[in-house]
Amino acid sequence: MKITRRDFLKGTATSLFLAGFNFPVLASTSKKKNLIVIMLRGGMDGLCAVPVIGDKSFEKIRKGILIENPMRLDSDFALHPKLRGFSECWHDNTGAIVHATSIPYTARSHFEGQNLMESGGRVPYQEKTGWLGRGMKLANLKGEGLALSLPMPLLLRGVPKNDNYYPSDGKLPREETLELLKSVYADSSEEELLDMMNFIKKRKNEQMGTGASYDKRNNKNLAMRAGQLLSNPNGPRVAVFEVNGFDTHAAQGGINGTHTKCLVEMDTIIQNLKISRKTYANSIILTVTEFGRTIKKNGGNGTEHGYGTAVFLAGGLVKKSQVHTDWPGLKRKELFDGRDLNATIDARSVYASAMSTVFDLDFKRIQKEVFFGDQLQNLSDKLFKA
Amino acid sequence: MATEATLAWPMIMHLDNKDNIGPKSISGKEEWRRKEKEPATINENHARELMELHTISPDGGYTQEDVIELAKIMTGWRPKWSKGRDHGNDVKFDRERHEPGKKQVLGKVYKSGKKGLELAIKDLVNHPSCKEFIATKLCRYLITDEPTPQMIAPVIKAWEQSDGFLPEVHKAAIQVAFEYNDKYKKFQNPENWWLTTINMSGSTYSYPTKEKLIDSHPLGIKPFGEISWQGWFLEDLGCHPYRQKQPNGFSDLEKDWLSTELIIRRIMFAKKAFHKYNVKDQIDDNIHEKIIRNNFDNPDKILKIVSKAKTNEEKHIILFNLPEVLKA
């Protein structure tokens, strides 16, 4: 008798999870593909995370906040030495970087920038939905998005019935109370509230934040939990994390500074998603940020809002470890506005390629229906496994 | 108010104006800077937020050049040191750090010196984009995510008639909110919902923290004990008043608060809150009827819904999560 994949997975879900590290074989045969986006809020400094090697003027200009002993990636680029999780991905050929990239936004405001990194548009505050939400809608993925934060990020909006997981203390009331509340919402035609009650009733059987829930809400544990949920064949296919605090105008610090702390938080998410091998093997993890930071440090050992930055890619669906870039150079006239790393790749090309790979959608359709027909480059073959 | 807020210590400190030093200022030319390789630089952070968040918004049409020029006007404002340290409450204008020369923001020229900032702020708050920005924000907060020009117009008018006197502007916004109350119901953010539940409960319930205790708390001391509970309740509901990480504050859009997790938090909060009331109120079988009769125009309908619940605790959860309470 032929066993379908779904049935097989149902039967073995528990043993699979318990097996943890030692069960990589099945992973590659599963077809449920996931997209995990980590939003780096505040402007991630691509040149701090992935510095260029052997550029004397760069080293001089960044003196004081330059990262020492970076890990060499290839002949031109290195990795921040504290990104141990990502360096493992690099070594097992599942970690890649797209450098000198950005969303097409150059006005350097966090709020506009973050709005556009999530909406995927060109005019701030014009779109009320996110590029990921629109992509999911195109792929008809209702109720398959999960935000590991509160409240629902713009990025995921545009497709109904997404969920948040960010547990609080205590227990939900008994089933009958929830049922009654649900019927109240049904009677008063409160569709949105009604939808939410359906989710809440499901949640009841899952882990609530009993015990040290503060711990459950840190990104490390949220990532572990998301890894479990995504590995469930009936679980979500899209997850979104948030890391705050990249806006280091002052005291950015070198190897142990604030910027490093934020990068390590991002790294921890990748590391802990990887614990769930099956999830990791069938995923693209991708970072987004609103802009990079100026090359030059300011008087307070910080950096100002810039333009070009880097995107981190990890997961089993990443084609190979590589730094993909069309490097614009760091000489004065090569810089954007004479001060920032230029962006030669529209970051939305990476987003669209990732969605095309994970959601099995035609790139052109994504380009047209998610990104308003803007000129984007199909990087699917270069960056991801078909 | 914009001037006072801009020059408040926390703003000068945390929006990095302490590091905003004119490269051509006296301090900027000092010998040690060259030796230590710590050049004085312009820090744009505070100047950008002043235009973007606090006055004219991106609709005001400023450029990167305007941001830099405004930042130059702001050079020199820094925390005030006395007795060898920064006490964390005063700021001063340090002439030696101020960038010399004229600066031009949005086409207008400002002279060098301490007075430049106040003049620039005056022009920013009188800019048409500032009125529209603030009026839209007020209507959005009070009425709907997408305010119409008809809603905004009376608020702008009140601004113009009162020369930007905020109590008059607020009054006009509240007036508009009343006029549209039947047509627009907005899902309330956690803080407003929480305050609504407290108002509804009234004096019958001994909850939350006693006013007397709050009044006796000395200013300038970090809340502790029972007084800090309220912050934690709000944290649990999703909007701790002091912990929003992005400088644009919490969202005014209802859709940003319509989330499963946040509804879970409200349900759990309503349950927890019930057990914080006086024992005598908890066991009073008529307590919910009293509350409903005091607070609703259609008490019988509400009473009918709530009476489907069996226990007082359950009634409490249902009552405070009715659509009529969640939306206003």
Image (cartoon, coloured by chain):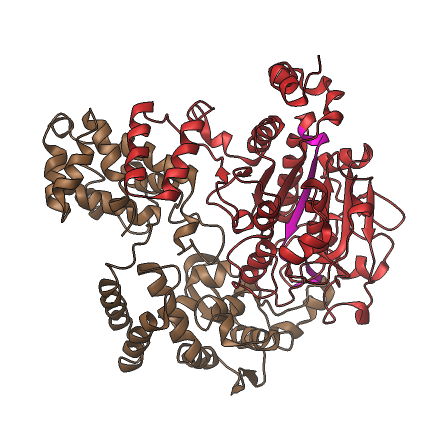
Examine the rendered structure and indicate whether residue B105 appears above or below residue B174: below
Residue A32 image position (x, y, % from top left): 67, 31
From the viewer's side, name the closer residue of B93 and A67. Answer: A67
Q: Is residue B217 visible?
A: no
The residue furthest top is A1
Q: Give the range drawn in magenta.
A: A279-298
Examine the rendered structure and indicate whether residue B193 appears above or below residue B249: above
Examine the rendered structure and indicate whether residue A289 appears above or below residue B230: below
Residue A110 image position (x, y, % from top left): 56, 60
**On the image, which quarter does residue A294 sit in?**
bottom right
In the figure, the shade used to draw chain B is brown
Query: Magenta stretch: residue A287 in it?
Result: yes
In the figure, the shade used to draw chain A is red
Quarter of the figure that contains the N terminus of chain A: top right
Quarter of the figure that contains the C terminus of chain A: top right
Examine the rendered structure and indicate whether residue A209 appears above or below residue A239: above
The residue furthest front is A1
Residue B309 image position (x, y, % from top left): 21, 28
